[in-house]
Amino acid sequence: MRVLAKDPLFVDPEQRRKIDLLGGIPVFRPKDHGVRETMVPGRRMIDICVERMVDGDWIAVFAEGTCNLTDPAHVQPLGSGMGHIVKGVIGAGRRVALLSIGIAYRENTDRGPAVMINRPIELTADDAKTPAAATRLAAADLQRAVDVAWDRAHP
């Protein structure tokens, strides 16, 4: 399995060692570096993910890796990277499944977060006609997981 992680997490040697053990792949985010500066590294990250998945690896994507302080019950807009990866892998003739996990933190921290793991869904060429279509499908599935987790955490 490979894990996508924002590039600042690779700076500290101890943190980088842990991420490297997870098969970390750095993500250079436009909000950290600017849109133009992240175009080439972003394309390379997508290509690496497609290569790894075609070779049989799994990719873990933390779509909301930053805390959603605005409205934690609703998934923030997802970037199109996941959709580009899905389209590339399906285009290479491989199967892709999506496993969404929703986490909702409770007001009472003694109990820990509520978690919902959706059933895996296989994405098809029709689902990935465009990267945007695959991204919308992933966002909707993740929102369903967050909805259940949120309801469990806030009955």
Image: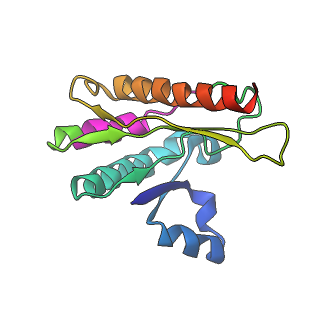
Q: Position of residue 58 (x, y in %)?
A: 35, 54
Q: Residue furthest left?
A: 93
Question: Which residue occupies 21% across, 38% down?
Answer: 90
Numbered disc total: 0
- Say which residue appears at 37% left-offset and 34% top-offset: 83
- Between 100 and 32, which is closer to the camera in this rendering? 100
Q: Residue 102: horizontal and vertical position, in percent?
A: 58, 37
Q: What x and y, as percent, mark residue 111?
A: 78, 46
Indicate the colouring scheme.
rainbow
Measuring 68% from the left and 30% from the top, which residue is drawn there?
152
Q: Quadrant of residue 1?
A: bottom left
Q: Is residue 85 magenta?
A: yes
Question: Compared with residue 124, is residue 50 higher up or lower down, i.e. above or below?
Answer: below
Q: Is residue 126 left or right of residue 66?
A: left
Q: Quadrant of residue 74?
A: top right
| Quarter of the figure with the C terminus | top right
Q: Secondary structure of the magenta portion, mostly?
A: helix
- 98 or 149, nearer to the observer: 149
Residue drawn at 41 percent across, 35 percent down: 119
Numbered range of the magenta stretch: 77-89
Q: Position of residue 150 (x, y in %)?
A: 68, 29
Q: Is residue 138 magenta?
A: no
Residue 76 visible (yes or no): no
Name above or below for residue 42 compared with residue 11.
Answer: above
Q: Is residue 102 visible?
A: yes
Question: Position of 118 compared to 75: left or right?
Answer: left
